[in-house]
């Protein structure tokens, strides 16, 4: 038998299983980042177009209530979406380089 005595998991099989689970987990993380990035970008543009991000009633002078401006919220969410997409694309690229070596 390869890898050891009867009844034990072969050493090669254990490494293969961990590697496959790691590959599957990496794919889930990659697609999760891509989906999250697309969701953030599309949702922010959609809410901006609908006016749901409008400032509404401005606070009275002298109150300690601060509302982030609409364009700043739009830019923040678009930037977060682009970062998530970039991380997902970077992981795809690194995984492709890693698989090319193997």
Image: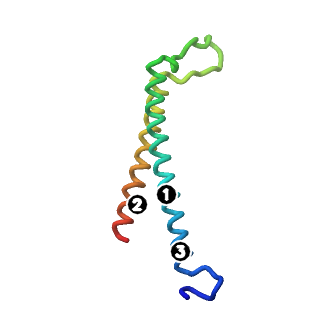
Q: Residues within 10 Å of mark 1 (few under 14, many from 20)?
A: some
Q: Secondary structure at mark 3?
A: helix
Disc 3 target residue: 15
- Pick the residue in front: 6 or 78: 6
Question: Which image quadrant: the C terminus?
Answer: bottom left
Disc 1 target residue: 26
Give x and y (percent) for residue 79.
43, 36
Above-or-below relation of 4 to 23: below
Q: Residues within 10 Å of mark 3 (few under 14, many from 20)?
A: few
Q: Residues within 10 Å of mark 2 (few under 14, many from 20)?
A: some
Above-or-below relation of 67 to 94: above
Q: Are marks 2 and 1 in contact (CB under 8 Å)?
A: yes
Q: Earlier in the sequence, mark 2 or mark 1?
A: 1
Give x and y (percent) for residue 71.
45, 24
- Pick the residue in front: 79 or 39: 39
Number of marks in picture: 3
> How far is the residue under mark 1 from the one under mark 3?
16 Å
Give x and y (percent) for residue 78.
43, 33
Residue at the spot 43% in from the left edge and 26% down from the top edge: 45
> How far is the residue under mark 3 from the one under mark 2?
18 Å
> How far is the residue under mark 2 from the one under mark 1?
9 Å
Res 95 → quadrant: bottom left
Above-or-below relation of 95 to 47: below
Q: Earlier in the sequence, mark 1 or mark 3?
A: 3
In the rendered structure, find residue 95 and report the number of the disc placed on it. Answer: 2
Residue at the spot 61% in from the left edge and 11% down from the top edge: 61
């Amino acid at each position: 038998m390869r890898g050891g005595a009867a009844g034990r998991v072969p050493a090669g099989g254990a490494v293969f299983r961990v590697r496959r689970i790691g590959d599957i987990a990496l794919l889930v993380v990659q697609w999760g980042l891509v989906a999250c990035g697309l969701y953030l970008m599309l949702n922010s543009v959609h809410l901006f177009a609908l006016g749901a991000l409008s400032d509404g009633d401005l606070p009275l002078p002298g109150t300690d209530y601060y509302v982030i401006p609409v364009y700043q919220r739009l830019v923040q969410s678009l930037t977060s979406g682009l970062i998530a997409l970039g991380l997902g694309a970077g992981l795809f690229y690194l995984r492709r380089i890693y698989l090319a070596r193997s």
